[in-house]
Amino acid sequence: MVLKIEVFGTGCVNCRQLEKNVRDAVGELGLAIEVIKIEDFETLIKRGITMTPGLAIDGEIVAMGRVPSVEDVKGMISER
């Protein structure tokens, strides 16, 4: 089963940084992980994202309103 990571954001600087940190973390771990960027505002609200950027791993919101570092993201992935 492939792990699925969703990055929620509307394209702001922090949202782009979070996406970069996630992709860097995935690359360093060398795992089969699908990374999806979700920018649609209605989808963000439906998923419970009230502050951007947001991050979900396998459907669970793990960060919102902040930019976890590459190391933080790697830790979040490893906990799965």
Image (tube, helix red, strand yellow):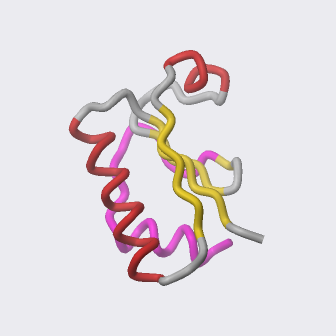
User: 24 or 57: nearer the eye?
Assistant: 24
Give percent across and percent down for residue 70: 34, 68
Quarter residue 78 falls in: bottom right
Give percent across and percent down for residue 59: 70, 48
Q: Is residue 43 left or right of residue 28?
A: right
Q: Residue at x 57, y 55 (%)?
A: 5
Quarter residue 13 falls in: top left
- For the N terminus, give its image quadrant: bottom right
Q: Residue at x 44, y 28 (%)?
A: 51
Please give the range of residues in magenta: 61-80
User: 3 or 53: nearer the eye?
Assistant: 3
Identify whether 62 is placed above or below 70: above
Quarter residue 46 falls in: top right
Q: Farthest residue to the left: give it.
A: 13
Q: Residue at x 61, y 46 (%)?
A: 61
Magenta segment: does it hold 65?
Answer: yes
- For the C terminus, give its image quadrant: bottom right
